């Protein structure tokens, strides 16, 4: 096929169609009529010799060929935009750019304080807008309306760029006066009352069902694998809360180790290893390919990774002092 005869606007149509999975909404996104979009879909089907989108009881579904094309088309459009944009330098010291960053409560408690310190030092006029996972959709991120998402992701769309900020384990936070702290084995753990804390997904959450332990996250899934279940009496979405609540002598909080270590200097609490295996998890940052080549965005990504390295250095030093 002679590429010179291909209307490259069709790739824009395909990108939006695969994102919206709806001809009418795709037409609205591009500011064209619905018949024009339908005609564009027909031409795309002829071009790729594939239906691309198939009607189902749940609406339009992409074919296997369409799913294979989606990240490639997104990359082509991103590269094309980069070629057409005038080359711009990013000057942190004078920039007044607004960076919108979606962060989980976990990332906000561990990464963001030092990141802000570094940003204020290098770019004092930059404006930071931190959003919660409930504020943001993958579509917002994909279209570049949000610069970055920093979270623990179960999955990230193929078209996104991503990088691992760090890997973390789990620790238990217990009052020194809690009887379970003296012999913290699996039996003591299961007999205790527990605090559940998490909010990692994108979109609005509607509470939890204590009976569905498999859906409560990594800790309860790890217990389920050994045929056990803990007694959860408090559910919270804020990682700052357990440090206060576990001062009640009958409560245990199982938290990411970086969160638990924030209480290392609290004389009322003790940090213990969980008495069963919980897999480690990754904190990742993800961003749209539309922003990947942007000089300001590259600066932000480098600064995030630099901040993560400094936090790791401080933790190693802290662990050394307490050994």
Image (cartoon, grey):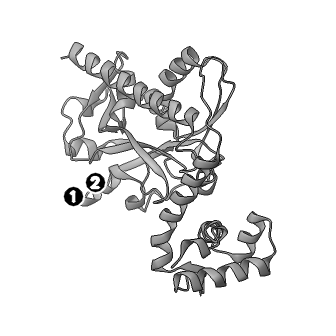
Q: Quickly name the residue at label 1.
A: 226
- Front label number (1 vs 2): 2
- Above or below residue 280? Residue 246 is above
Where is residue 71 shown, x and y percent of the image? 49, 63
Residue shown at 53% from the left, 81% from the top: 48
- Classify mark 2: residues with Cα within 10 Å, few (<14), some (14-19) or many (20+): some
Q: How far is disc 1 from disc 2 in space, using C-alphas?
A: 7 Å
Where is residue 116 shown, x and y percent of the image? 54, 22
- Classify mark 1: residues with Cα within 10 Å, few (<14), some (14-19) or many (20+): few
Q: Quickly name the residue at label 2.
A: 222
Seen from the viewer's position, the closer of residues 161 and 242 is 161
Where is residue 241 shown, x and y percent of the image? 50, 32
- Above or below residue 311? Residue 274 is below
- Above or below residue 268? Residue 287 is below
Quadrant that contains the C terminus: top left
Disc 1 to disc 2: CB gap under 8 Å? yes
In this rendering, does residue 181 appear at all? Answer: yes
Where is residue 11 shown, x and y percent of the image? 60, 68
């Amino acid at each position: 096929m002679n590429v010179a005869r291909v209307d490259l606007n069709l790739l824009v149509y395909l990108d939006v169609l695969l994102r919206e999975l709806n001809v009418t909404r795709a037409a609205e996104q591009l500011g064209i009529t619905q018949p024009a979009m339908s005609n564009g879909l027909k031409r795309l089907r002829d071009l790729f010799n594939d239906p691309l989108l198939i009607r189902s009881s749940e609406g339009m579904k992409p074919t296997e060929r369409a799913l294979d094309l989606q990240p490639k088309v997104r990359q082509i459009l991103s590269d094309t935009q980069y070629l057409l944009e005038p080359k711009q330098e990013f000057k942190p010291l004078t920039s007044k750019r607004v960076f919108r960053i979606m962060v989980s409560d976990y990332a906000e408690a561990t990464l963001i304080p030092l990141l802000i310190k570094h940003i204020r030092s290098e770019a004092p006029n930059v404006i930071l807008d931190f959003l919660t996972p409930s504020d943001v959709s993958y579509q917002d991120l994909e279209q570049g309306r949000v610069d970055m998402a920093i979270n623990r992701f179960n999955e990230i769309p193929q078209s996104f760029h991503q990088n691992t900020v760090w890997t973390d384990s789990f620790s238990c936070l217990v009052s020194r006066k809690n009887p379970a702290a003296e012999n913290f084995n699996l039996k003591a753990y299961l007999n205790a009352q527990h605090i559940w804390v998490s909010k990692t997904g994108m979109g609005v959450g509607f509470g939890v069902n204590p009976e569905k332990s498999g859906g409560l996250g990594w800790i309860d899934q790890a217990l389920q694998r050994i045929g056990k279940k803990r007694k959860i009496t408090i559910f919270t979405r804020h990682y700052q809360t357990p440090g206060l609540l576990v001062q009640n002598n009958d409560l245990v909080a199982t938290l990411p180790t970086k969160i638990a270590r924030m209480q290392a200097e609290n004389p009322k609490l003790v940090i213990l290893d969980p008495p069963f295996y919980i897999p480690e998890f990754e904190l990742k940052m993800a961003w749209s390919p539309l922003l990947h080549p942007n000089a300001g965005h590259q600066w932000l990504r480098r600064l995030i990774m630099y901040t993560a390295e400094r936090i790791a250095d401080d933790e190693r030093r802290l662990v050394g002092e307490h050994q």
